[in-house]
Image (cartoon, rainbow, N blue to C red):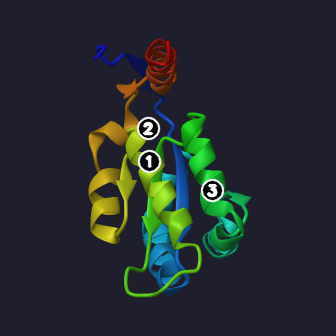
Amino acid sequence: MKEDTYLSVHVGKQKHIALIAHDGRKKDLLNWVEANKEALSHHFLSGTGTTATLISEQVGLPVRPYKSGPLGGDQQMGSLIADGKIDFLIFFWDPLSAHPHDPDVKALLRIAVLYDIPVANNQASADFMLSSPMMNEEYDHNVLDFSARIKDRAIDLVKEGN
């Protein structure tokens, strides 16, 4: 087995933060954003559907909106993470309610782990992460180079076929 290779990823002082909340947690996220408005105002915010709209309208922070989660918004956020355009995910999800887009939610969380970005799924984790000194600093981390791994796997498969 070949040794894994890594890509260095640089995160600037201003983070690109995705804000998402299931319907049963939207009020909680709105309250949290309102309480942390000053800190969040120094970062670039995006969000899915109704969540982004509510934050913009009720809290007054600019939030770039994407589609609603069930209409592809979770997948859009995953794509942004994979493209290095989201540095931090705050997703207040409701673990006690059924969601028609549950596979999309799991895929989003999987992508966040694969690309090594911080994820807050509740107020306590969001509080801890937002209050971290690292939120106002540049940060470099290494992400597994999946393209190199796929290329190596393709070469191995060709060799096995011969």
Q: Which amino acid does label 2 sit on?
A: Tyr
Q: Given the current orientation, which residue lies at the most extreme front position?
A: 162
> Are the residues flagged by discs 1 and 2 in contact, CB closer than 8 Å?
yes
Q: In which quarter of the image is residue 80?
A: top right
Residue on which the image places disc 3: 75
> Are the residues flagged by discs 2 and 3 in contact, CB closer than 8 Å?
no
Residue 67 on image: x %, y %? 73, 64
123 sits to left or right of 102: left
Measure how far apart labels 1 and 3 are at the Cα level: 11 Å
Q: Which amino acid does label 3 sit on?
A: Gln
- Looking at the picture, tell me which residue is in the foreground, 51 or 147: 147
How many numbered marks appear? 3
Element marked by disc 2: loop
For the point 52% across and 23% down, the residue is 147
For residue 112, the mark is 1
| Mark 3 Cα-neighbour bin, 10 Å: few <14, some 14–19, many ≥20 | many
Measure how far apart labels 2 and 3 are at the Cα level: 15 Å
Residue on which the image places disc 2: 115
